[in-house]
Image (cartoon, helix red, strand yellow):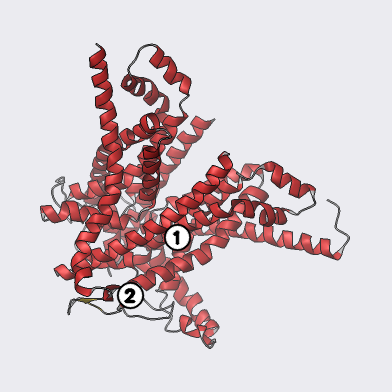
Amino acid sequence: MASARARGDSIFGGLTLVATALVLVVLAGIALATLIGGWPAFARFGAGFVSHTVWDPVQRDFGALVPIYGTIVTAVLSLLLAVPIAFGIAIFLTEVAPRRLVGPISAAIELLAGIPSIIYGMWGLFVFVPFMADWVDPWLTASLGRLPVLGVLFSGPPLGLGMLTAGIILGIMVVPFVAAVMRDVFTLVPSALRESAFALGATRWEVVWGVVLPYTRTAVVGGIFLGLGRALGETMAVTFVLGNAHDFNLSLLAPSTSIAAAIANEFTEADSATYLSALIALGFILFVVTFIVLVFAKLLLLRLARQAGR
Amino acid sequence: MSPPRTLRGRRRQAVNALALGLASLATLLGLVMLAWILGTTLIHGAAALGPHLITEMTPPPGAAGGLANAIFGSTLLILVAVLVGAPIGVLAGTHLAEYGRNGPFAGIVRFVNDILLSAPSVVIGLFVYQIVVRPSGHFSGWAGSIALAFILLPVVVRTTDETMRLVPISLREATLALGAPKWRMITQVIYPAARVGILTGLLLGIARISGETAPLLFTALNNQYWSMDLGHPLANVPVVIFQFALSPYESWHSLAWAGALLLTMFVLLVSVLARTLLRGRTN
């Protein structure tokens, strides 16, 4: 009897352990499988793989600088847009909104995160790209495009496609993630701290800027990095609106590509082993970069959680 | 509050009003974007709705047709992904909550699981391409389901772990005091107590994988015809939307919008259901 029950326990416990180990195996497997798959490209092109702009499937010569550059620029643009908006939403939900509006508005903002990225892509292609081409791009070229040095960022024909459009759409997608983290950590601020600031005569904004934000700073940065991780790896939304061009162009209004978009667009067209390997190598680079960003984000978020738990 | 008398006081009030006004504006902007995206999908999608969507197959270029094979394919892919991913996820979550608890191993796994939760799905697709598609020599529904299962897994692990840890310790002590072995305590007391939370996690996971497109491009790919065979390329709604939307044909665009509307409604319904369940539990 005693041995039967010990057997039941060890079988069940063993099963749960195997399942848990699988979580670790999947993460290690992703790194290993993409490294092995991309190895022929890394071995053949060496450091040139990340520093050259030539992407020529016919000559089988691959340099990934353009997609890497596109990934970084679109992600940075998305954060420039998403961080202030998410901060505003978090302030509105924690300081301004009447109590009965908080639930519905939070739910609506969360819906933005629930919309599949391919829907963002379709909306981007059919609605937002024409909007940018008709209204925003011509205006930017006529105003900022005339500036001496920065002008080159806004030059070129108003196609609507490009890194600026992709960055804006990514920004909209990232907003709910960053806003949710900010709102959650803002509520962790001890009310004694907030109330003493109010008692000293501080305005709401001064309490947010002088008390709430300093207290939650590390977690807020963690939330922003979480958003950065999302933006770097997002695929379908940007694939539709980047234009898939491997020509290096400084202009934010010119067609470009990103790591994820290049993989999604070209994978089924890859007609040589080298081409396929180059795309998988891109995947490996993307994984390593997002991994580092996400680890950093988690560590920052854990710090506030520990502080609040104390 | 009485109006400030000093110049400095008036300026501080003005800055405060400006900041809170901008914050309200940011929220309004978020809501406008939501309405714009959902509204566009609804208008274009509703115009393309009709019974042909579920009675006809995806058409060749330029022709008329429906999405029957893609809807069926997506359902099959998601179903198999849940059957594969959910039990593993629940078991792993069980380990974290009941065996690992606050130990270092459980801490590492939780950390890794959170990373996996945010890892780019396109890379998970490449991973499954390497371990399933390449060895077998062809794209297949199985590969698609496995990729989706890997995306579902961390969602289920996390929610299972979190809800099981919420079950009161006294329930465990009472069960063990009756002489029940630990595995019976978990399966017959803890699981029933945590079932709403586990179900919520499953629904959130389904909402997450239903819209996934990128990983399916390297695994299930697509199939123009009706197929129930997981051993071969399988039609699915997201990849059909992707290919049809980027095509030059008007009839394909219209089908892509119909697919987009069906997909969005399904995903939002499932996530609203999950949230309602969650709210019912906390009250």
Rendered position, B109 above or below A292: above
Q: Residue furthest front?
A: B104
Instruction: For marks 2 and 1, give the CA distance.
Output: 19 Å
Q: How many marks?
A: 2
Residue occupied by mark 1: A228
Residue A65, which numbered label?
2
Nearer the N terminus, badge 2 or badge 1? 2
Q: Amino acid at mark 2?
A: Leu
Rendered position, A179 above or below A187: below
Res A26 visible: yes
Q: Quadrant of the C terminus of chain B?
A: top right
Residue A31, which numbered label?
none
> Disc 1 on helix, strand or loop?
helix
Q: Residue furthest left?
A: B137
Rendered position, A269 above or below A307: below
**Relative to A73, B30 lies left or right:** right
Which quadrant of the structure image shows residue A101?
top right
**Relative to A13, B261 lies left or right:** right
Mark 2 Cα shell of 10 Å, populated few (<14), some (14-19), many (≥20):
many
Q: Amino acid at mark 1?
A: Leu
What residue is at 28 percent from the left and 22 percent from the top? A9
